[in-house]
Image (cartoon, helix red, strand yellow):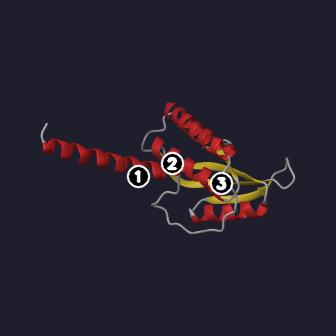
Amino acid sequence: MGPGDVLFAVFTLFIIIALVASTLSRIGGRDPRLPHKVYPTVEHKTNKRQIDNMDEQRRRSAQALAELRLKGVGLDAKVELQYVFHSDKESNAKLLRSSLLERGYRVEVQRRVDGDNQFDVKGWTTLVLMTETELIGWTGQMCRMGIDFDCVFAGWGVDGKKP
């Protein structure tokens, strides 16, 4: 193995690391292709419960995608997803609503019937490509938005089924 081969191997490894880092940053946060507007967020610290919820939601998304594949949803399918967040403060729910509207999502805030000062933020997305990378990335973005606005991303569904 000559010096040229070593240089080629190092260059190839650098490219692979850059691609993986780019994919991971998109999965864990805001999609850089979307326009970004800064909204006031609620000051808080991310806690273990929120991190556990993000892990659980990503696991559920992968599982739901596998079920959709069995029902014939292909890799190139684009689907509108129904989503739900929960909040214990109407002001936080309304801030989250504004951010979701900016994404072009249909969204409404409703007071929950099963509790005092509990609010649901729910609606429908624009079309989402049903690949594992896109769906898990979208799920991470929704969880991060929940954290940013001190709300909890409760999940998603399709065809009118509750998340």
What is the CA distance from the residue labelled 2 to the residue labelled 1? 12 Å
Residue 83 percent coordinates (x, y): 64, 49
> Which of the marked residues, 2 or 1, is nearer the chain's N terminus?
1
Q: Which residue is drawn at 49% across and 38% down?
A: 73
Q: Nearer the viewer, mark 2 or mark 3?
A: 3
* Residue bearing the label numbered 2: 137
Classify 10 Å Cα crowding around label 3: few (below 14), some (14-19), many (20 and above). Answer: many
Residue lying farthest to the right in this orientation: 116
Residue 37 percent coordinates (x, y): 56, 69
Q: Are discs 3 and 1 less than 8 Å apart at CB?
A: no
Residue 49 percent coordinates (x, y): 69, 43
Q: Which amino acid does label 1 sit on?
A: Ser
Q: Which residue is drawn at 61% across and 44% down?
A: 54
Residue 4 percent coordinates (x, y): 13, 45
Residue 124, placed above or below residue 135: below
What is the CA distance from the residue labelled 2 to the residue labelled 3? 15 Å
* Residue bearing the label numbered 1: 22
* Residue bearing the label numbered 3: 147
Q: How many labels does the image show?
A: 3
